[in-house]
Image (cartoon, rainbow, N blue to C red):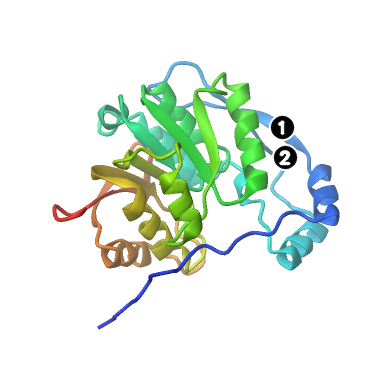
C-alpha cells in the first residue's frame, strides 16, 4: 500500500553550460543522417553527435555541471515511436490534431507528426541546448515556422503552469502527447505522467515508447501511469519492435 503525495514536484533544472562545457560541446562532431520512416514519403535529415563514444572529459564536466546531452542523439525509442505514429493504427489519431512532444531532443517524432497531417505540433525539451539542435533539424526539414520548439520542465510547478498558460498550449489541452525513450531515471515516470495529466485534453491520448534503462522497467512505467490516474493500453508493433512496446495512455472517463 502506497500513499504518494506529488504536489510541487518538478524536474531538476539543468544548469546553463559553463564556458568550459561550451568549449567541450563545440568540439563534438556532428553529422546529418537521413532517417526513413515507413508510410511517409521521402526521409528526414537529423543532425546528431557523430560516433558512439563521448569523450571522458565531457562526461566528467556534464556530471559536475548538472547538464546533459541526451537530446543530441536519435535514440531507438524515438525512431520506433515515429514509425508507430505512421502506422494505420495510430495515424488517424494524428491527423488534424494538436500534438505535444515531451523530451523531444532531435524532434524526430514531432516532425513525423507534422508530416502526417497534424494541425499543430509543439516539440519540448528540458535542456535548452538540445532545443538548438531541434531548431536546426526543423530548418533542415523545411519545418521551421511550422513546428514550434519550446523548453518545458516536467512536473507540477511554476514552469509547467507558465507553459500551460502560454500561447503554446491549447486552452483545452493537447489532443495527443508523444514521447519516445525519455525515461532513463527512476524519478522521471511520475514527473512525466503528472505533466501528461496537466497538458492532455480530457479525451486525448498519449503515446509513449519506452526502452528500459537503469531501473526504469516496464512495470515501473505502468505503475507510474496508474498512480497518476491514467489508464494504459499496450500494443506491440511486431513489424517494428516486439521488445519495446508502444504504450497508449488515456485519461479515465472521470478525468477533468
Q: Is residue 112 left or right of residue 44?
A: left
Question: Percent from the top left, x then y, of residue 236?
Answer: 29, 45
The residue at 33%/40% (across/down) is: 171
Disc 2 to disc 1, C-alpha distance: 6 Å
Kindly indicate the quadrant of the structure image that contains residue 105.
top right
Question: Percent from the top left, x then y, of residue 233?
Answer: 23, 51
The residue at 22%/52% (across/down) is: 251
**Mark before the other along the chain sequence, 2 or 1:** 1
Residue bearing mark 2:
50
Q: Is residue 203 above or below residue 85?
A: below
The residue at 46%/54% (across/down) is: 160
Q: Which mark is residue 42?
A: none
Determine if residue 234 is in view.
Answer: yes
Q: Residues within 10 Å of mark 2 (few under 14, many from 20)?
A: some
Disc 2, SS: loop
Residue bearing mark 1:
31
Kindly indicate the quadrant of the structure image that contains residue 93.
top left
The residue at 43%/35% (across/down) is: 82
Q: Quadrant of the N terminus?
A: bottom left
Amino acid at each position: 500500500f502506497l500513499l504518494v503525495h506529488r504536489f510541487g514536484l518538478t524536474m531538476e533544472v539543468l544548469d546553463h553550460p559553463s564556458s568550459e562545457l561550451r568549449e567541450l560541446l563545440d568540439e563534438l562532431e556532428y553529422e546529418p543522417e537521413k532517417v526513413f520512416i515507413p508510410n511517409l514519403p521521402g526521409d528526414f535529415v537529423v543532425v546528431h553527435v557523430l560516433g558512439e563514444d563521448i569523450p571522458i572529459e565531457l562526461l566528467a564536466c556534464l556530471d559536475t555541471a548538472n547538464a546533459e546531452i541526451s537530446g543530441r542523439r536519435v535514440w531507438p525509442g524515438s525512431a520506433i515511436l515515429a514509425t508507430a505514429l505512421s502506422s494505420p493504427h495510430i495515424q488517424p489519431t494524428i491527423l488534424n490534431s494538436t500534438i505535444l512532444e515531451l523530451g523531444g531532443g532531435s524532434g524526430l517524432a514531432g516532425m513525423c507528426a507534422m508530416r502526417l497531417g497534424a494541425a499543430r505540433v509543439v516539440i519540448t525539451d528540458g535542456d535548452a541546448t538540445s532545443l538548438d539542435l531541434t531548431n536546426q533539424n526543423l530548418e533542415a526539414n523545411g519545418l521551421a515556422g511550422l513546428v514550434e520548439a519550446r523548453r518545458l520542465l516536467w512536473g507540477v510547478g511554476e514552469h509547467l503552469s507558465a507553459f500551460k498558460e502560454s500561447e503554446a498550449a491549447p486552452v483545452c489541452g493537447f489532443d495527443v502527447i508523444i514521447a519516445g525513450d525519455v525515461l532513463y531515471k527512476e524519478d522521471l515516470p511520475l514527473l512525466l505522467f503528472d505533466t501528461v495529466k496537466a497538458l492532455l485534453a480530457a479525451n486525448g491520448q498519449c503515446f509513449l515508447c519506452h526502452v528500459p534503462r537503469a531501473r526504469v522497467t516496464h512495470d515501473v512505467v505502468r505503475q507510474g501511469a496508474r498512480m497518476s490516474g491514467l489508464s494504459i493500453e499496450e500494443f506491440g508493433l511486431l513489424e517494428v519492435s516486439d521488445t519495446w512496446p508502444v504504450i497508449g495512455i488515456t485519461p479515465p472517463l472521470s478525468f477533468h
